[in-house]
Image (cartoon, helix red, strand yellow):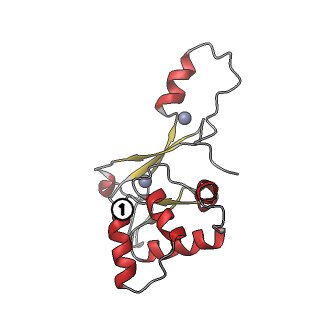
Amino acid sequence: MRSPTELVQVFRDKQMKLTPQRQLLFSLLHDNKSHPTAESLFDVARKQMPGISLRTIYQTLGELAEMGELQLVDLGNGATRFDPNMGDHQHFVCDSCGAIHDVDITSAPRLRAGSAEGFAVEEIGVVFHGRCNRCNTNHGQQDSSSNKRSPGLQAKK
Ligand SMILES: [Zn+2]
Ligand SMILES: [Zn+2]
């Protein structure tokens, strides 16, 4: 995804709607590696701009995705996530806290679907599951605290 300043220019050039709400979203999404859902962006955005609507969030996300600035990520757990990282990458999902991390993978194109003869495979998506660094570190210790889930990174249900 381009920088918020560049996006403002692009929106101006295309004479697309450019409101403070949209610009807030540009900056919330820029360099955002948490793979947020529309709802979680809404939660953050309305703290800074109470008048913002979920509808605006969806519209802006949709436009950015259409422009190729964002990709939609569906990791099979229901919620669509938005990812400003347009580079070729896959995802790691922590089954303990729900955090999603980018994973660079170089050998995916060599994967073969054994029983997919006759199918035209256009894309291969790999999702890694396990425990993130933080959960892994906590795991070995005697965990007496009940607070082992991170509220900030938890997937919204
Ligand atoms: Zn974790
Ligand atoms: Zn990603």
Q: On the image, which quarter does residue 153 sit in? A: top right
Relative height, residue 121 to residue 99 (above, below)? below
* Residue furthest bottom as drawn: 15
- The residue singled out by tag 1 in the image is 86
Q: On the image, which quarter does residue 125 sit in? A: bottom left
Residue, x 59% and y 56% (percent of image)? 48
Q: Is residue 40 left or right of residue 66?
A: right
- Of residues 68 and 94, the one nearer the viewer is 68
- Of residues 2 and 121, the one nearer the viewer is 2
Residue 72 shows in this picture = no
Q: Position of residue 93 (x, y in %)?
A: 52, 44
Q: Position of residue 40 (x, y in %)?
A: 61, 55
Residue, x 45% and y 64% (percent of image)? 26
Question: Could you tell me which quadrant the N terminus lies in?
Answer: bottom left
Q: Is residue 151 left or right of residue 71?
A: right
Q: In the structure shown, which secondary structural element does the residue marked by tag 1 occupy? A: loop
- Mark 1 vs ligand 2: CB below 8 Å: no
Count up the numbered dots. 1
At label 1, counting other C-alpha atoms closer than 10 Å, the crowd grade (few under 14, some 14-19, many 20 or more) is few
* Residue furthest top as drawn: 142
Residue 36 shows in this picture = yes
Q: On the image, which quarter does residue 37 sit in? A: bottom right
Q: Position of residue 69 (x, y in %)?
A: 39, 69
- Of residues 88 and 154, the one nearer the viewer is 154
Q: Position of residue 57 (x, y in %)?
A: 58, 68
Residue, x 36% and y 54% (percent of image)? 89
Relative height, residue 133 to residue 43 (above, below)? above
Residue, x 66% and y 50% (percent of image)? 156
Q: Amino acid at mark 1?
A: Met
